[in-house]
Image (spheres, helix red, strand yellow):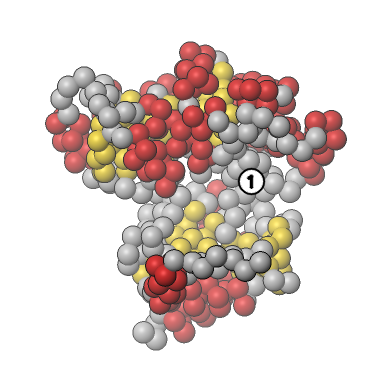
């Protein structure tokens, strides 16, 4: 049976995407140990991964998942609210509360679902939401879905946020929404200043610790722990799919808050629960994160080395950042794709990020370091990058 004929506008839009160098193809890759992967039969050093603590392929997580898989089967079979919350979900939520130092926790099927659902549950048409311009799409979509008045601010120019907060009148809530670590820039939100503003203007502060959970803080709880402001933040959202090496999102907080989220957040209520085996793996991962803080130390050392080396290059822009995400700004999407392709030929997989994910004129390589990468891996990457930049940037 032949498929139905597509509307002409779809073909036109696809061609436009191709003509502007923004077409994204689907690829299949196989993750390997040691910070490597296989793509189209080629083994590469994987500098595009969010598995910051190298736990996704850890034998202990695999064993925990395998044991739960044998016991519980594959899927959760229903939403957590109906009948999908197994003993593994309960154990993980209890362990997350212990890890975060709170009374309770609630799981979501993904970090995207957590952000979308929580922001849209907190805000409504009578409220005003203040959203950082670099926030992840899931936070932005949650702000839009809520129907609240949307005000966009820049975290490096908080004067505008202060003015906009001061303008709001009426009984509606004021809600500040931010990533703690911005995923495409690696820059850090000024959480202390945001807490000050939230308290001054009686605003709710929601932060997403997706790229900070497991990476920042003395215990690995995130940037709010690192900066000592956990008790000043209304909602802290975390993820299990990056440094934790598993899947899902979560919120940890007071029991009343968790009970309210359980009853009000649609993306949790109407989604099938996480597979129990994933919960078992995440439980084991949290144990390892607490028992092996040297993983964060090694990650920090590797990232600092690579960032310092890249900042010495004069033919690219390296924005101010911290942690394992290092953007290499090449501006032009075509150049970005060429450099990424040449790096792949040299044995390195690096994310090539173009609009609309990032603003026009800021196409970039998003280099992501993990604690599995060796110093030699990074030194060879720098040499390959220099060769490619000489061909694609300096010759322009």
Which element is circle 1 on?
loop
How many dots with numbers?
A: 1
Residue 121 higher or lower than 150, as above or below: above
Side of 164 relative to 350 (left or right): left
Between 48 and 251, the one lying in front of the other is: 251
Q: Residue at x 63, y 40 (%)?
A: 247
Between 91 and 383, the one lying in front of the other is: 91
Side of 259 relative to 152 (left or right): right
Task: Residue 83: name its quadrant.
Answer: top right
Q: Quadrant of the N terminus?
A: bottom right
Extreme-bottom residue of the structure = 395
User: Where does the image place residue 173, in percent across and percent down from the top left?
Assistant: 27, 24
Query: Is residue 281 visible in this depiction of the protein?
Result: no
Residue 215 higher or lower than 83, as above or below: below
User: Where does the image place residue 184, in percent across and percent down from the top left?
Assistant: 44, 54
Query: Is residue 172 visible in this depiction of the protein?
Result: yes
Extreme-front residue of the structure = 1
Residue that carries the numbered disc 1 in the rendered image? 53
Q: Residue at x 62, y 29 (%)?
A: 79
Q: Quadrant of the C terminus?
A: bottom left
User: Where does the image place residue 314, in percent across and percent down from the top left?
Assistant: 38, 72
User: Where does the image place residue 66, in percent across and percent down from the top left?
Assistant: 82, 39
Q: Residue at x 51, y 37 (%)?
A: 113
Q: Residue at x 33, y 60 (%)?
A: 359
Between 28 and 81, the one lying in front of the other is: 81
Residue 349 higher or lower than 67, as above or below: below
Q: Residues within 10 Å of mark 1 (few under 14, many from 20)?
A: many
Task: Residue 30: name its quadrant.
Answer: bottom right
């Amino acid at each position: 049976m032949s498929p139905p004929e597509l509307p002409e506008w779809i073909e036109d839009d696809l061609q436009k995407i191709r003509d502007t160098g923004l077409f994204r193809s689907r690829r299949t890759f196989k993750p390997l140990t040691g910070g490597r992967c296989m793509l189209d039969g080629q083994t590469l050093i994987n500098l595009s991964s969010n598995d910051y603590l190298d736990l996704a392929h850890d034998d202990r997580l695999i064993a925990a998942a395998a044991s739960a898989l044998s016991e519980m089967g594959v899927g959760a079979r229903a939403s957590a609210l109906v009948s999908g919350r197994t003993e593994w979900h309960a154990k993980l939520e209890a362990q997350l509360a212990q890890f975060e130092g709170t009374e309770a926790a609630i799981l979501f099927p993904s970090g995207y679902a957590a952000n979308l659902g929580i922001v849209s549950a907190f805000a409504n048409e009578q409220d005003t939401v203040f959203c950082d311009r670099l926030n992840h799409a899931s936070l932005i979509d949650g702000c839009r879905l809520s129907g609240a008045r949307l005000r966009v601010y820049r975290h490096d120019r908080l004067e505008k946020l202060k003015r906009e907060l001061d303008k709001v009148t009426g009984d509606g809530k004021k809600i500040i929404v931010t990533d703690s670590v911005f995923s495409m820039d690696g820059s850090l939100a000024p959480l202390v200043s945001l807490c000050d503003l939230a308290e001054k203007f009686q605003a709710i502060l929601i932060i997403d610790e997706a790229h900070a959970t497991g990476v920042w803080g003395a215990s690995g709880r995130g940037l709010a722990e690192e900066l000592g402001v956990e008790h000043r933040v209304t909602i802290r959202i975390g993820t299990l799919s990056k440094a934790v090496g598993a899947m899902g999102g979560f919120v940890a907080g007071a029991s009343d808050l968790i009970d309210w989220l359980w009853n009000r957040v649609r993306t949790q209520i109407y989604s099938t629960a996480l597979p129990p085996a994933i919960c078992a793996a995440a439980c084991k991962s949290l144990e390892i994160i607490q028992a092996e803080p040297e993983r964060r130390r090694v990650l920090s050392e590797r990232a600092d080395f690579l960032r310092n080396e890249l900042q010495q290059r004069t033919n690219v822009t390296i924005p101010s950042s911290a942690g394992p995400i290092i953007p290499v700004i090449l501006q032009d999407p075509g150049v970005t794709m060429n450099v990424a392709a040449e790096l792949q030929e040299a044995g390195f997989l690096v994310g090539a990020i173009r609009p609309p994910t990032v603003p026009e004129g800021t196409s970039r390589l998003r280099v992501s370091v993990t604690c599995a990468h060796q110093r030699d891996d990074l030194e060879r990457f720098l040499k390959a990058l220099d060769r490619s930049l000489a061909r694609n940037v300096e010759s322009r």
